[in-house]
Amino acid sequence: MQVVKLAVLFLTAFLGRCQAQQRENSSSPWFCHDLDCPPFVTLDKNADYETRQYTPANWVSVNVQNYTYSAAVSKGFAPLFGYISGANKEGVRINMTAPVLVKVLPGDGPFCQNNFTISFFVPTQQGDTPVPTEPSVYLSRLPAATYFVSSFGGFADDTSVPAQAAALTAKLTANGEAFDSSAFWTAGYDAPYKLTGRHNEIWILKSDAAGRSGSTPAKSVAG
Ligand SMILES: *[C@@H]1O[C@H](CO)[C@@H](O)[C@H](O)[C@H]1NC(C)=O
Ligand SMILES: *[C@@H]1O[C@H](CO)[C@@H](O)[C@H](O)[C@H]1NC(C)=O
Ligand SMILES: *[C@@H]1O[C@H](CO)[C@@H](O)[C@H](O)[C@H]1NC(C)=O
């Protein structure tokens, strides 16, 4: 039942894409399709991962504690979808964006539950950021940051996500990269009913040589 409800939410959220196939943003990568997604510059690239620099961006987020990635994402998606559907002080609808970003803080919660932050990108072109009315939903601003990014197809789930995160960590270690091992992110660009041509990413924050992270923690945005 929960799965069906979630599939319907995803379906509704991504439906707008069908009417907007013509809209092309030449500077946007293919995996964003016709959705707004945060701009970045690729600084470096090898066979296994790329180094991407993101500019500061606004996100709308919820925190969820659970043992599994899939349960946490299911739980976090609904209130965020509510927010873009009008659960905000202005009562406005916001177009679905990409990616759905999930920060994973492994084993932090009680009984080794993981902390997850599920976020939707809020483009500044959509005007002043509407204020969420659901108490669990909050606005945050991710500062400029540099991430190591690996890509994979298929579905991001409880099997692929830990495996892909471990693979990227191993590659970064082998290459002597300085990175923040306390957390990683998944970025998903496709609705669950899309079966082919899917694109998912693992992001790991680059550190400077002294081990400091290439960003500061997300800060709450007033108003
Ligand atoms: C939302 O999407 C529709 C259809 O693609 C588009 O016409 C409209 O301009 C978008 N609105 C904003 C605020 O980006
Ligand atoms: C994790 O999520 C599932 C599915 O929503 C839920 O049934 C379960 O109670 C959650 N576990 C915890 C420890 O919160
Ligand atoms: C983990 O999540 C809980 C509940 O949202 C929060 O109180 C706690 O501060 C989080 N821990 C970290 C390290 O973010």
Image (spheres, rainbow, N blue to C red):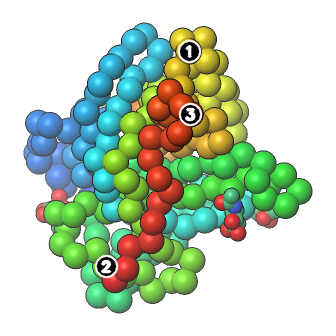
Residue where numbered disc 3 is placed? 211
Tell which of 9 and 1 is nearer to you: 9
Crowding around mark 2 (Cα neighbors within 10 Å: few <14, some 14 to 19, many 20+) is many
Residue topped by disc 2: 130
Q: Is mark 2 within 8 Å of ligand 1?
A: no
As helix, strand or loop, the secondary structure at mark 2 comes to loop
Q: Residue at 35%, 17% (x, y): give it.
A: 45
Of residues 119 and 82, the one nearer the viewer is 119
The three-letter code of the residue at mark 1 reads: Gly
Front of the two marks 1 and 2: 1
10 Å neighbourhood of mark 3: few (<14), some, or many (≥20)?
A: few
Give the left or right position of residue 49, taking residue 130 as reference.
Answer: right
* In this view, 148 is above or below 94: above
Quarter of the rendered image showing ligand 2: bottom right
Say whether residue 66 is left or right of residue 132: right
**SS of the residue at dot 1?**
loop
Task: Determine which quarter of the picture holds residue 175.
Answer: top right
Q: From the top left corner, tell me how far across and down residue 189 is, in percent.
A: 40, 43
